[in-house]
Image (cartoon, rainbow, N blue to C red):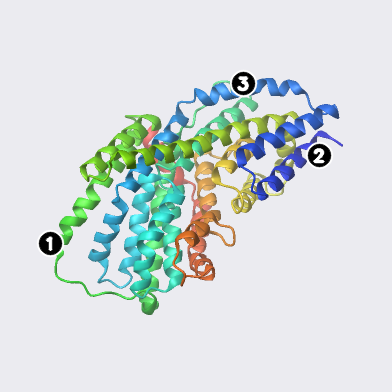
Amino acid sequence: MTEYTLAGGMFAAVFLVLLSGYPVAFALGGTALLFAALGTWLELFDAAFLLALPNRLFGIMTNETLMAVPLFVFMGAVLERAKIAEDLLDTLTELLGSWRGGLGLAVTVVGALMAASTGIVGATVVTMGLLSLPTMLKRGYHPALACGTICASGTLGQIIPPSIVLVLLGDVIGSAYSQAQLDQGVFAPKAVSVGDLFAGALLPGLVLVGLYLVFLLLLAWFKPEWMPARPVGARHGRLLGRVVKGLVPPLLLIVMVLGSILGGLATPTEAAAVGAVGALGLAALRRQLDLARLREVMQSTTRMSSMVFLILIGAALFSLVFRGFYGDEMVVEWLTKLPGGALGATATVMAVMFALGFVLDFIEITFVVVPIVGPVLLGLGLDPIWLGVMMAMNLQTSFLTPPFGFALFYLRGVAPPQVSTWHIYLGVIPFIAIQLLMLGILALWPALATWLPEQIYE
């Protein structure tokens, strides 16, 4: 038995433990400790590697960028309780309802706005499912199309900033880029920040929303019976006022958060604090936040943040033991020997991450897989911002893919009885094809992700 064998066995073991339903953080940490004990007994592991764990935990505690996570989660939870999505959907539906496919367009636009406001996929899919799915079915929309539209628009929180995925990926990609440069003998490495990744993901995210809208318009033209129009009364003056009232406040909040980051006026953590305070202000103005709801918001924020950081601690222990078995060297040898050079290695990693997205959450993949493969891919000359955006888009696609896509389970949990699982699976297929097309566009045109950061920060 060799170190490489134990390194590969660690991944297989933690995968099996995760499939059993055991909590992720404890699965990562427990598997690492068991293999560390086995490796020590076989004299294939130096227990001194574990002495680095306190320094890693201290680094997590003092990482200012990660402070943005609970703040963005808090902002999203407050906006969800303030019923902003509900008001937006109602007013946009009335405004666009007379169009063929107007309700589908409204759901997609509101999903994009909620993605830019909350950045939390599960909350967006559940909220949109509860609010819009019964209405779409009542208006005569095909169940598969209704489910696919809601799932796809709900997962936009993966790629449209400010996204929790991009915050975590930005921190990990930045560390991996620094490590790759140090491995190449560059002792004054360039830095990549979460703000860089936000800027890089903005245009691809908007293009993806545009592709969704184009698809829905084409489908409304060629399959009008799937997306019937609804006559509306002549209340456009009052309705326009409602749209402005419902649309302007969340848009201002998005501009405040993203604009301060992209304009270099604030770090992501500072902007997240502004967003949290702004969300509280919106909720207070709408009289949608009392002490009971605020308590719920605080509890949900604490649970989500605790889960993220506990997984991060487990992943730190896992990666230490993995490196103790020279697993990082094994990955380097494996990726560099693949045919196709950097292109082949990137395609392989993307395929593995896509498959892992069926059974693992983006947090586990970000903390466990990216720190291992990131330095290798970046050492092959790939742009870190482009790679981070590709990974985020890839994870978003796996969130939609049957039979294990997380977004599908979220919607299944709130869908009415007349909607079958088959409807959900069938409905997401065209949107998966659109996202794969978007991945291909990004692969062929990296400037779509790198142009805006270059214009802002250089």
Specify few, some or many for label 3: CA neighbours under 10 Å numbering under 14, 14-19, or 20 or more: few
Q: Nearer the viewer, mark 2 or mark 3?
A: 3
Say which residue label 1 marks: 237
Specify the label residue 193 is tagged with: none
Say which residue label 3 marks: 54
- Give SS at disc 3: helix
Q: Identify the image quadrant of the C terminus.
A: top left
Residue 115, relative to residue 457: is it above or below? below
- Give SS at disc 1: helix
Specify the label residue 5 is tagged with: 2
Residue type at the position of mark 3: Pro
Specify few, some or many for label 1: CA neighbours under 10 Å numbering under 14, 14-19, or 20 or more: few
Residue occupying image coordinates x 49% and y 39%: 385
The answer to the question of whether label 2 and label 3 lie on touching residues, with beta carbons closer than 8 A, is no
Residue occupying image coordinates x 59% and y 58%: 404
Q: Earlier in the sequence, mark 3 or mark 1?
A: 3
- Residue 67 figure quarter: top left
Q: Nearer the viewer, mark 3 or mark 1?
A: 3
Residue type at the position of mark 1: Gly
